[in-house]
Amino acid sequence: MADQPGAAQGEGPTPALPDLLPLFAWLSPSFPVGAYAYSHALEWAVEAGDVKDEASLAVQVSDLMRLGFGRSDGILLAHAWRATMAEDGAALGEVNALAVCLAPSAELRLETCQQGRSFLDAVRAAWPSPALETAAGGLSGEVAYPVAVGLAAGAHRIPLGPTLEGFLLALVQALVSSGIRLAPVGQTAGTRVVAGLAPAVRALAADIPALTLGDLGTATFRADLGSFRHETQYTRLFRS
């Protein structure tokens, strides 16, 4: 019998790789979740002078990911993924309720819930599946964005590791995109920020699966306060 293509002589057939194409589409900037409308209080940080160049943008985004909502959203995604894989609707509902309640301001609650509902509606329309309908059917009200992503990935049996890495990197890219539009930072500089934070994203994604809901928490109080101040900014490009 001929060897399997791509397999070394003496080895068995190459294991089938998971289908990650849906994940690439879901986390693309073109996916209709409205991420372009939100800055996660980065607009206020620029107004306050905290973010004014490439270096300060990198620090702000790094802190938001490692110490702020990025880490917490990753934990919530992982638990939503596990609840969906286990077909545990009650656990999924509890994770979602917690995610919605953790939003520190009305603007950030709108950000996560609008994106979560838009994401879930788009995936159900374009990538339907019985498992997705069962899980999504139990979330009739507000849906937090990380919970929606974890639910969809679990329903389509996309592994947790790639889902976390893709999701966290997409958050970085969205924040940097906002920074490019707000601060004197060019596209090349923004790309350097994304590339520079990629190792931290990978390390965070590797740590999250071992964390529990008891590990949730942030240390980005100034950014949280900035989301309140953003409500009354004189000029605004973003909704948060």
Image: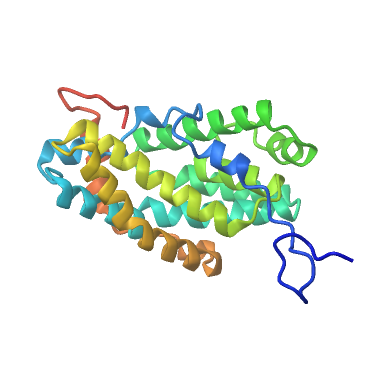
Q: Residue at x 35, y 54 (%)?
A: 65
Q: Residue at x 64, y 42 (%)?
A: 152
State whether residue 117 is above or below residue 170: above
- Residue 1: percent from left, percent from top: 89, 66
Q: Residue at x 60, y 57 (%)?
A: 160
Q: Residue at x 49, y 50 (%)?
A: 166
Q: Nearer the viewer, residue 125 or 80?
A: 125
Q: Is residue 167 left or right of residue 180?
A: right
Image color mode: rainbow
Spot the residue most to the front. 2
Q: How many marks?
A: 0
The quadrant in which residue 121 appears is: top right
- Residue 54: percent from left, percent from top: 17, 47
On-image quarter of the C terminus: top left
Q: Nearer the viewer, residue 181 or 68?
A: 181
Q: Nearer the viewer, residue 171 or 224?
A: 171
The quadrant in which residue 48 appears is: top left
- Residue 219: percent from left, percent from top: 30, 59
Spot the residue most to the right. 1
State whether residue 14 is above or below residue 171: below
The quadrant in which residue 2 appears is: bottom right
Q: Is residue 125 left or right of residue 183?
A: right
